[in-house]
Image (cartoon, grey):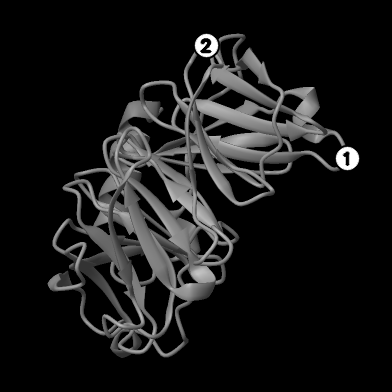
Amino acid sequence: MTSVKQQAKKHRSLFWGSGFWVPALLLLRLSLAAQSDADTFLLQQNLPVQARFATADNLGNTYLITPQNAVEKYAPDGRLLTRYTNNRLGRAAMLDVANPLKVLVWYADFRTVVFLDRSLTVLGEINLFSAGYPEVRTVAAAADGNLWLYDEVAFQLKKTTPEGAVLFESPALNLLQSERIAVTTIRDDGTQVLASDPDRGVLCFDVYGQFQRILPWKGISTFVLVQNRLEYLGEHALHIEHLQAFFSQEIRLPVSAKVEGAQVWAAPGRLLVQNGAVLEVWARK
């Protein structure tokens, strides 16, 4: 009988050696046999705040965008550390705190990125329309302090400086496949860059923007990428794809995350749940 280890080796070889589209037959992902008691979340704190977006950094700090459009940072013990507000750029859509020393704030309506330091003081700002990128749906912080964006006019993933100068770019992806790619999330963990298109799958690039392959896991609009793990929220669980070991894992969501009207966000090692006037911060056990 073939061992699990031998099967994993076989599937990894078939998977990583494939081209742009990977046949579904090769996606027989090995799952953990059962969810142990260790695979769960523990409530760390209840913050008496409301958020329309929330995330956490690798130091345990929590960041959120309030309904009043302010960006706030909370310490692991729940103390409000600092706040940033900018109402001239419209609605803040997303925060990327992969580098807590250089927080990225994305103002999608005005195609503007603002970089903040650890105290949420402005480091710089770039308007992508003015920089020559009129159609950008999403951006991400690069591990080295630069910026990733998907240029929907050129069909290219691009890495730019904070001022907009191109450092690296992918081939035009419309030349690789006929259907339009619509990237909704980009993430860089320092060793690879992933970009999701819910209708196509997850596109993989190296740190120089060169296209590698596509993982045909559809329906993923947002995700977390950390230490070769792609993590995304499902209806009842946090799904974890171990990209090197090539197996899947699920961690059940706490009951409060399933309450009608609750908002849930995944972050590295954290789960953030907005229930009414309380933001719950859950840590992975």
Within-10-Å neighbours for mark 2: few <14, some 14–19, many 20+: few
**Can the viewer see residue 197?**
yes
- Among the 4 quarters of the image, the one containing residue 128: bottom left
Q: Is disc 2 placed on a helix, strand or loop?
A: loop
- Which residue corresponds to the image point at 28% horizontal and 62% vertical from the top-left? 148
Looking at the rendered structure, the kind of residue marked 1 is Glu
Q: Is residue 119 left or right of residue 55?
A: left
Would you place residue 126 above or below residue 226 in this image? Answer: below
Looking at the rendered structure, the kind of residue marked 2 is Asp
Within-10-Å neighbours for mark 1: few <14, some 14–19, many 20+: few
**Can the viewer see residue 3?**
no
Picture coordinates of residue 225, whole percent (x, y): 38, 43
The label number, if any, that marks residue 260 in the structure image: 1
The alpha-carbon separation of the residues under discs 2 and 1 comes to: 28 Å
- Among the 4 quarters of the image, the one containing residue 129: bottom left
Residue nearest the observer in this picture, 67 or 182: 67
Residue nearest the observer in this picture, 173 or 257: 257
Q: Is residue 112 left or right of residue 93?
A: left
Q: Is residue 26 left or right of residue 191?
A: right
Picture coordinates of residue 152, whole percent (x, y): 39, 83
Picture coordinates of residue 159, whole percent (x, y): 21, 66
- Which residue corresponds to the image point at 85% horizontal and 34% vertical from the top-left? 259
- Which residue corresponds to the image point at 62% horizontal and 9% vertical from the top-left? 37
Q: Please name the residue that numbered disc 2 is placed on.
A: 77
- Between disc 2 and disc 1, the foreground one is 2
Of all residues, the one furthest to the right in this rendering is 260
- Which residue corresponds to the image point at 36% horizontal and 64% vertical from the top-left? 214
Residue nearest the observer in this picture, 224 or 21: 224
- Among the 4 quarters of the image, the one containing residue 239: top right
Q: Is disc 1 placed on a helix, strand or loop?
A: loop
